[in-house]
Image (spheres, helix red, strand yellow):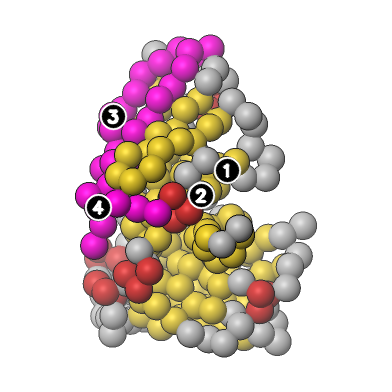
Amino acid sequence: QVQLVQSGAEVKKPGASVKVSCKASGYTFTSYGISWVRQAPGQGLEWMGWISAYNGNTNYAQKLQGRVTMTTDTSTSTAYMELRSLRSDDTAVYYCARDQRQLYAGYYYYYMDVWGKGTTVTVSS
Amino acid sequence: EIVLTQSPGTLSLSPGERATLSCRASQSVSSSYLAWYQQKPGQAPRLLIYGASSRATGIPDRFSGSGSGTDFTLTISRLEPEDFAVYYCQQYGSSLGYTFGQGTKLEIK
């Protein structure tokens, strides 16, 4: 079955970096992109960015530009999200999601249809 | 950037009742760019509706989506106990990526 398996919880100090992995299975990895979404404690969902697993093109949320890098390893069907210069307000659950960009009947559809279970990142001194 | 505003913030209903959740956009959104998700405590979001009105695979037909332009609605025709959760709408903004509404919490009355 289609699934995304994320790496385990991380605890980091302010100023450090974190790299979260997301291993895909059950589908052709390079046929889709991966979006990363985070959720601070008790808060809503925040889109962080997208990477094409086909050609590595990326699109990052403006507020994270310069601090986030998304990559893929097609040999292992794994996506990575690295966030640098961590601050306390980066404490959140980080999700990867399969990003559907589907052309149907002349219209493009955009949505996230499969999600990982999430990786908790805690930033604390 | 398009802002999505969901209402109400919290909706208190009983099993068997009908739920109507609203998502209003600050500018017109293409219907094919609008999706709805359900999130239960401690779980990842789950896709319910894409293209404003198409149910995702495995989603019961008591869930339906409608709307166009700036006003979109998620309707749950008869609430089951497992439907009590937080619901988010989402839109795709091309080079600006995705934005989510702030969520509607559907709680048992």
- Report the Cα–Cα distance between label 2 and label 3: 22 Å
Mark 3 vs mark 4: give the one in front: 4
Residue at label 3?
Answer: B8
Give the residue number, with chain letter if any, for mark 1.
B54
Query: Badge 4 is on which residue?
Result: B27
Mark 1 vs mark 2: tell me if same chain.
Answer: yes
Label 2 sits on what residue type?
A: Gly
Label 2: which residue?
Answer: B51
In which quadrant of the rendered image does the C terminus of chain A lie? bottom left
Q: What is the chain identity of the residue bearing mark 3?
A: B
- Identify the subunit bearing mark 4: B
Q: Chain of mark 2?
A: B
Q: What amino acid is labelled 3 in the image?
A: Pro
Work out whether residue A120 can be spotted.
Answer: no
Q: How many angstroms separate mark 1 from mark 2 (CA)?
A: 6 Å
Q: Residue furthest front?
A: A106
For the residues labelled 4 and 2, the Cα–Cα distance comes to 17 Å
Residue at mark 1 to residue at mark 3: CA–CA distance: 23 Å
Q: Secondary structure at mark 2?
A: loop
Describe the element under mark 1 as helix, strand or loop: strand
Amino acid type of the residue that numbered disc 1 sits on in the rendered structure? Ser
> What's the magenta region?
B1-30
User: Where residue A17 appears, x then y in whole percent?
Assistant: 36, 81
Q: Give the residue type at disc 4.
A: Gln
